[in-house]
Amino acid sequence: MDAMEAILTRRSTRKFQTGLPAKELIEKVIEAGRYAPSGSNSQTTHFFVITRKEILTQLAGLVQREFAKMEAGPDTYISLRNSISASKRGNYVFHYNAPVLIVTANKKGYGNAIADSACALENMMIAANALDLGSCWINQLHWLDENAAVRAYIKKLGLGEDETITGGLILGTPADGMPVRDALKRNGNPVEWV
């Protein structure tokens, strides 16, 4: 699969087989993230690769409890509103039971923290598609970055005091064995030629 095909056919996957993909495939996805561009080549994106089921289960429970304590207002963006609502119903697993969760963090106060991590996450999702793995961007830990309980838990996994949680993605073998690759029609993202 060439680069353009990997980009244009990448779709989000939210249903996975339970087993871990081969470690070599996970390592290739991480390598793609580590080779993403960063401001002034700072290379400060920190990757947490979570594959232990008990940690994923504990983290899902913690995220559900913390979102359930929140209230959504009229200006709350729809994804966060959906996370809060599902958590209050008690049936929310933010990582869709994927066998791999890759969390990114970067330096607090660093102006390119989100951009650098976004480049890494996108590289990893494109690489996953090229390797016949499914992936999906996951923002819930970023939304809970200032939550004391969530920060304390992620600190136990290696988050530095000087770091902010910038995003994440889930990874695994799609439930049907292969990623869905039907390109979505683009109705937004206007382009102006000047």
Image (cartoon, rainbow, N blue to C red):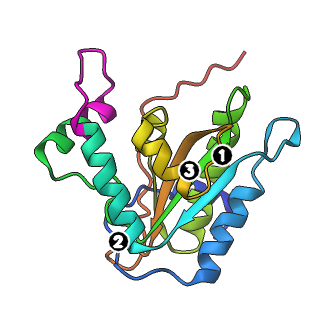
Which residue is disc 2 drawn over? 16
Instruction: Give SS at disc 1.
Output: loop
Residue 14: tell me if it is visible.
no
Quarter the N terminus occupies: bottom right
Instruction: Give the distance between the C-alpha atoms of the residues marked 3 and 2, in whole angstroms.
Output: 27 Å
Q: Which residue is mark 1?
A: 160
First in sequence: mark 3 vs mark 1: 3
Circles 3 and 2 in contact, beta carbons < 8 Å: no
- The range drawn in magenta is 68-83
* Label placed on residue 155: 3
Chain-order first, disc 3 or disc 2: 2
* 80 displayed left or right of 90: right
Residue 100 vs residue 158: left or right?
Answer: left
State which mark lies toward you, 3 or 2. 3
How far across and how far down the image is residue 164, in percent? 60, 37
Rendered residue at 41%/59% (across/down): 182
Q: Is 45 above or below relative to 112? A: below
Q: Single out the mark in the foreground, 2 or 1.
A: 1
Amino acid type of the residue tagged 3 in the rendering? Lys
